[in-house]
Amino acid sequence: MTIDLSMPGSSGLLDDIGGKKYMNFFSNRYVLALTGAAGIGGFLFGYDTGVISGALLYIRDDFPAVRDNYFLQETIVSMALVGAIIGAAGGGWINDTYGRRKSTLVADMLFALGSLVMCAAGGPYILILGRLLVGLGVGIASVTAPVYIAEAAPSEIRGGLVSTNVLMITGGQFFSYLINLGFTEVPGTWRWMLGVAAVPAILQFVLMLFLPESPRWLFWKDEKAKAISVLEKIYDSDRLEEEVELLASSSMHEFQSDGTGSYLDIFKSKELRLAFFAGAGLQAFQQFTGINTVMYYSPTIVQMAGFTSNKLALLLSLIVAGMNAAGTIVGIYLIDRCGRRRLALTSLAGVVVSLAILAMAFILQSSSDICSNALNGACQGALGWFAVAGLALYIAFFSPGMGPVPWAVNSEIYPEAYRGMCGGMSATVNWVSNLIVAQTFLSIVGLVGTGLTFLIIAGIAVLAFIFVALYVPETKGLSFEQVELLWKERAWGNQGNRQSLLGAAP
């Protein structure tokens, strides 16, 4: 038997290819509902990422200790990342032990509590505590949401559905800037900005009480009747039988006969090492190519470009966040058509170019020889707009590719027994990288200048391009079982025909 790995068309709700019916993105409202509810975790992730950049402008005004202290500003931003690292590291174990649904409920409780603590903070250190609690919730959600969505999604639309979670992240960032603008003239500005995040956390908590556990997790935990009950709402009878057979086969071929896995196994097994290296590398490069530098500090970057008004800086940052969300929609459309690998490579090529433009704008702006004294104001203004254009171009290239691809790939490249653990470890790599960037960006800018800082990030993007080209395989349209066989082929150097190998799966 040979399996056609090409992406089926999308002319109807169900596409009949070779006698097998494939779903398109909108063909099952139940799957979309699960995706939307789980994606609120992504919304919380994105909202927190975006809201702190605007709130920081007003926190500096309220707390003199913060105003002139770059390290304290970076700590307020970064403490959520410390929490996210801990949450992601423990979130993998929580996911595998207690399931995706309960993990989401825990994340919601932590996020809501942290939001209320930040809202009531009387000083910078209570604010930092609230940021830590929010970070714990965000870290667990960052592991759980992509896995929950991927395990309920048909393989032919899995990339797009997981990318919907990334759309929720970027949508959360966009909404955070709307909130930032809306509360600029309201007393207690930053308190409202940070406190309102408790609302979507409570909403998701309520919704998850009525949603099922992941069918794959249920099957893995030998609750087959419950798993099949969920799968019946996703697939027709013919496809259901095939999916159940694949799940049964996968359960029989887990790495350990008792169906459990340990962190040590990940480093013992060559195929798991290769998968984790590719997944963790993507997550690290997503951060080191600068995306959350842009999202955390975009108002500050805009001010560095010469726009000194807080309100104007937030407005321009809102446009950047809107482009990020729009680009993610493009990524949802392309990821199951062009594939993960090609999309990431194209994205990174554009990121290198846009970062070079952004760097050049700041370098020219800082050069006293470029603008004559007579025309200095107009020249500086033009260069400021050039920097903002570079920022927008960066988002236009990054958001369709390196935004969704790392999360989509990490949700699908690990075996069931290790999906939570590996996903948690990989998300931890993302958050550690995020922390390093957030904690050092302003300091590096102060040391070498904004222009050179963006040139350094451009150099890292070149390394990311090489990494993806060498180590990240294409997983478009593959079932979880086929992806496992792909890694075995890579690990053990099987020179046989790839499609024949994949087709040999029961």
Image (cartoon, helix red, strand yellow):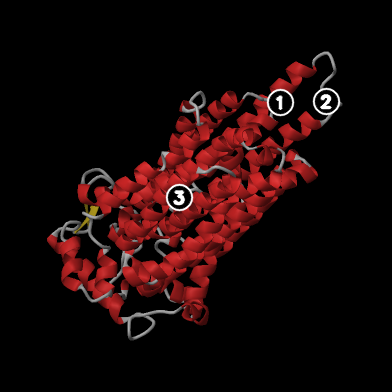
- 488, above or below 76, in the image: below
Mark number, residue 370: 2
Residue 32 falls left or right of residue 307:
left
Position of 222 compared to 259: left or right? left
**Residue assigned mark 1:** 383
Q: Relative to residue 162, is residue 488 depicted above or below? A: below
Q: Which of 178 and 351 is in front in this view?
A: 178
Counting from the top left corner in percent of width and height, residue 384 is at: 68, 26
Q: Nearer the viewer, residue 443 or 429?
A: 443
Task: Look at mark 3 in the image and give the residue it sits on.
Answer: 114
Picture quadrant of residue 213: bottom left
What secondary structure is found at the residue carrying circle 1?
helix
Q: Quick one: label 1, few (<14), some, or many (20+) residues within 10 Å?
A: many
- Which of 208/434 is in front? 208
Left or right of 294: which side holds 325? left
User: Residue at the spot x=48%, y=54% of the render?
Assistant: 133
Which mark is first along the chain, 3 or 2? 3
Label 2, label 3: how many angstroms apart (C-alpha)? Answer: 48 Å
